[in-house]
Image (cartoon, rainbow, N blue to C red):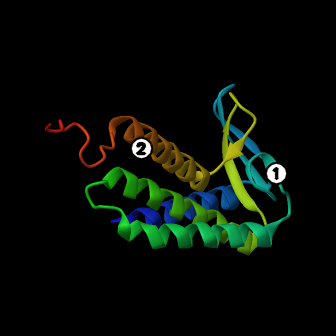
Amino acid sequence: MGFLIALAVVLLDQGTKFLVQSRMVEGMSVPVIPHFFYLTYIKNPGAAFGMLAYRTQFFVVISLLVVGVIAYYYPKVPREWGLLRAALAMQAGGALGNMVDRIRYGRVVDFLDFHVWSYIFNVADAAITIGSVILAFYFIAGSKNEKEVSPGEGQQSEG
């Protein structure tokens, strides 16, 4: 199931980027909901907010490492933890989607532009973010709900 989620993220990401690139010119902005949501086509040479611009090889290596770590640990996650497995698959798919852009263009195609903040992003970024939020929530909620009991704790000693 994780492979299918990751593949769906990559296909949706690359498909939406293709549509944007085939119908818009770089720098073009189209209001979808005026003063709130626009489609704004840019190519980001860095990470979030343009940090570490033009470090393409670095980001490709990081993406491969992230996907490799996820691929290694994913089978070890119990099937009952479906939400955690989905989160990891979303992160892997997002990393791969942006990596494709970095390899093809040396930059990442971004186009989702909410005017409530100054960050323009794409489907891959959204998948990575949603996966990270689920992962963080899982570990925060899990750590509050799990109580480790050492052997013998809670038992009364005799004598």
Verify CB contact (< 8 Å) between mark 2 and mark 1. Answer: no
Please give the name of the residue rendered at 49% of the width and 50% of the height, measured from the top-left corner.
Answer: 131
Identify the element where label 1 is drawn. Answer: loop
Query: Left or right of 12: which side holds 30?
Result: right
Q: Residue furthest front?
A: 159
C-alpha span from label 2 to label 1: 28 Å
Disc on res. 87: none
Nearer mark to the viewer, of 2 and 1: 2
- Judge whether 76 appears above or below 154 on screen: below
Quadrant of the rendered image containing residue 141: top left
The x, y position of residue 54, in whole percent, is 86, 63
Please give the name of the residue rendered at 75% of the width and 54% of the height, measured from the top-left corner.
Answer: 47
- Judge whether 115 appears above or below 153 on screen: above
Please give the name of the residue rendered at 51% of the width and 42% of the height, measured from the top-left corner.
Answer: 133
Q: What residue is pinned by disc 2?
A: 138
Quadrant of the rendered image containing residue 8: bottom left
Q: Within 10 Å of the Cα at label 1, are there few (<14), some (14-19), or many (20+) other Cα atoms?
A: few
Q: What residue is pinned by disc 1?
A: 51
Q: Amino acid at mark 1?
A: Met
Query: Left or right of 126: which side holds 36?
Result: right
Q: Is residue 27 visible?
A: no
The x, y position of residue 113, in whole percent, is 68, 39
Query: Left or right of 52: which side holds 136?
Result: left
Query: Left or right of 135: which side holds 26?
Result: right
